[in-house]
Amino acid sequence: MKLASMENGRPDGRLVVVSADLGTCVSAGRIAPTLQAALDSWESAEPQLRALALQLEKGRVAGEPFVPAKALAPLPRAYQWIDGAAYLGHLERVRNLRNSGIGQIATDRPLMYQGASDSLCAGHAPIRAPDAELAVDFEAELAVILGPVPMGAARSAAAGSVRLIALCNDISFRKLVAEDLTHGFGFFHSKPATSFASVVVTPDELGAAWRFERAHVRVRVELNGKVFGDLDAGADMDFTFADLIVEAARTRQLGTGTILGSGTIANRHAENGARPRKTDGYACIAEARTAEKAALGKAVTPFLQHGDRVRIEAFDDRGRSLFGAIDQRVELNLS
């Protein structure tokens, strides 16, 4: 089942069920007005939404064209957004960045931080930054949206709390990372609003690709029309989504609608070239720059510039788009 939140002049939008091919949608307002409302009453809402999805697929209800440009983030404002670090390969690379502020990498428990969730961005919204010198970077990630999780949840309860899966772009201002980590309580100014693809899916929508609490799907990242990364999101995920949920709930309960990110997707591969290979590559510029320094003695790929276009999309094993595309232009304040 696929769901989205469409613009309707209200902060949380209106909930729709989206067809499997992302071509049409139908209002779910009679079941739940918003995605958060559906999550809050999931036991009763979920089977009704599935029934509506089946009717849409069989042509038994009149759908309307699904227009991603009119979609909001699936949860435009969420009660909680937590980002984890499930891919140690990413941490190993960015640790080598000058002044990254990242020290020894812990391998027994995943790192995570609590990000801003009051205004999550649509996948077509521009990437905005107040200063062209902040080293603006994209980060392609998957995320899960959760039902209630008790404090100290067991792994089985954590795995069973996953309601939906999402695709996101966790934008970073790299030049502020060290400052945040050194002088503050963690990421704050270096992490602006995160962007989300318009559609979220239930785990069963991934079929066999959802296994061992990982999503084994291809995530393709393009920068200005050229492939920057073509990654397997499940292959090198050191901590599963269940691991992340258990860690997040170690000292607190997690409320319904909590979004938990995987961290930047990273595949381990030989760092033997200055440019990413088509079959793996990178999900952020920082990693590419680290590889370039190792190969060439200097980084050559610039961070995002005004007018750059970033596209992030995930595909199933038949090459079909799962969440729709994140497709954003960069708008920097150059005054």
Image: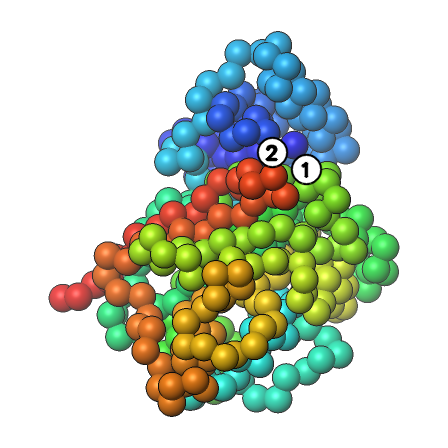
Q: Which residue is drawn at 57% across and 26% down?
A: 19
User: Do the numbered discs 1 and 2 sit on residues whose CB atoms are within 8 Å?
Assistant: yes
Which residue matches tag 1? 205
Q: In which quarter of the image is residue 251?
A: bottom right
* Vertical arrangement, residue 163 with respect to residue 191, above or below: above
Quadrant of image for the C terminus: bottom left
Residue at the spot 43% in from the left edge and 47% down from the top edge? 326
Label 1 Cα crowd, 10 Å radius (few <14 / some 14-19 / many 20+): some
Place of residue 248 in the rendered image (x, y in percent of width and height, measured from the top left): 70, 65
Left or right: where 162 falls relative to 12: right
Q: Distance between the residues labelled 1 and 2?
A: 8 Å
For the residue marked with disc 2, what is the amino acid?
Lys
Q: Residues within 10 Å of mark 2 (few under 14, many from 20)?
A: many
Image: 197 above or below 156: above
Quarter that holds the N terminus:
top right
Q: Where on the picture, by quarter, is residue 104? A: bottom right
Residue receiving disc 2:
2
Image coordinates for residue 115, horizontal then vertical, percent = 52, 63
For the residue pair 176 and 218, the one nearer the viewer reads as: 218
x, y percentage for residue 263? 58, 65
